Amino acid sequence: MTMVADDIQNLEARHVLQTYRRQPIALVRGQGVRLFDSEGREYIDLLSGIGVSALGYGHEGLTRAITEQAQTLLHTSNLFYHPLQGQLAARLTNLSGLERAFFCNSGTEANEACLKFARRYWHTLGEARPEIIALEESFHGRTMGALSVTSDEHYRTPFEPLMPGVKWISASKPQAVLDAVTNKTAAIILEPIQGEGGVRPLTPAFAAAVNEASQRTGALIIADEVQSGCGRTGYPFYSAVIGLKPHLMALGKALGAGVPVGAALVSSEVATKIMAGDHGTTYGGNLLACRAALCLIDELIGGGLLSHVGRIGQHFDRKLQELKAKHACITDVRGAGVMRGIELDRDAAAIVPAGLKRGVIVNRTAENVIRLLPPFVITEADLDEGLARLDQALGDITA
Ligand SMILES: *Cc1c(COP(=O)(O)O)cnc(C)c1O
């Protein structure tokens, strides 16, 4: 059964580098939390383009803001000032407590920037700090630096040798952090909720050990909030929820609500060690990107979206507990806000096509986990309908 319009699929098969395994549908339109494919079928989106489309589709405020920006000015490069970068940086400082922002275009670039800034910090201080500590089950992106601190062997092996000096520790052992971090450690990089690794929140005990190890040795803490940040958990950033005190933070995914934008936030202590010319990007922080991110932050704070995610998150939690009680194949449900994982006692790959047949978009990660990252704007009614479809799909794959 080919479900996608043949011409779309055939053209790609001839000309697009085959790095992705796509589902056999082509999405052509969205409205609210619903997506429509080339054959006119409707899906409830519980994934938002892997945690990106925070405001759903066809959002009035975002559409107006980026249309207006396109009519005014899209891009200037970083050779000149424009009015929006400073505004966005100030908003991000208010939310994170980190004083300065560097803008880029993706999550992996944000991590790349954080790694470079950590190295630069120690270089400026004249101290040799060759090591980075990273976590098992981590994902930080696909460029060479970010890949070097990403744990999955399948992603890493074909591209070795990677950046040297990376040491791996388990997120379930606070003592491992205390043992591994020394005065040779430049930085510890970690996701407050490990996303690709199976939606695994770090514990406050682990965060406390990271803080302690950092205070003892001076090692910097890099929080990769690309997936868990920008309101997805009902809080601006999940670091604060578990008590983690990062010096650097990587942002991406939901930040531009669909417009590509990433950011590396740094403390003033780190910022003073970074000089003009140390890092840069042509597109980074252009007007379109900043306008979209400002729109998201306006919605989160002024528009009440952050508290909406908090409320929806509680409802989500109850619904997932019900689902777990109903399906024996569910071994655990985890997460916060609208970032949730459903762990199965088996490989979860079959849930994706089964979901599409039932009209719901979900994702599988870490082999046996169904990952749900719906748009922040989802209502209880739409979430219930999406989860009812997932419930049917679970029945289909276990029947
Ligand atoms: C998605 C993700 C990245 C990579 O972001 P890209 O925009 O795909 O480069 C990095 N870290 C985490 C935690 C992510 O979820």
Image: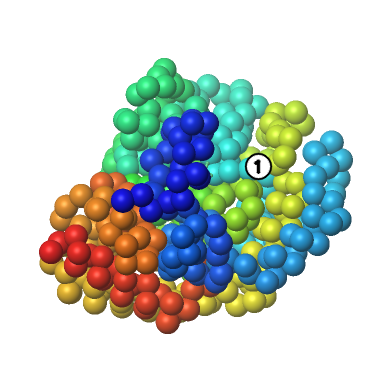
Residue 93 at what x, y percent from top left?
67, 57
Image colouring: rainbow
Establish whether ligand 1 lies closer than 8 Å to the Cβ of label 1. Answer: no
Q: Quadrant of the C terminus?
A: bottom left
Inspect the image, locate mark 1, and give the three-letter code of the amino acid beneath it. Answer: Cys
Q: Is residue 146 left or right of residue 367?
A: right
> 325 or 242, which lies in front?
325
Q: Residue furthest top?
A: 161
Q: Residue at x 56, y 34 (%)?
A: 112
Residue 372 visible within the image: no
In the rendered image, the vertical position of residue 355 relative to residue 317, given as above or below: above
Say few, some or many: other residues with alpha carbon within 10 Å of mark 1 (under 14 / 14 to 19 / 20 or more).
many
Q: Residue at x 53, y 21 (%)?
A: 128
Q: Residue at x 75, y 28 (%)?
A: 277
> 148 or 353, which lies in front?
353
Q: Which residue is mark 1?
A: 104
In the rendered image, the vertical position of residue 143 relative to residue 334, given as above or below: above
> 331 or 379, which lies in front?
379
Residue 18 at what x, y percent from top left?
44, 32
| Secondary structure beneath label 1 | strand
> 289 or 272, which lies in front?
289
In which image quadrant can residue 30 be found? Answer: bottom right
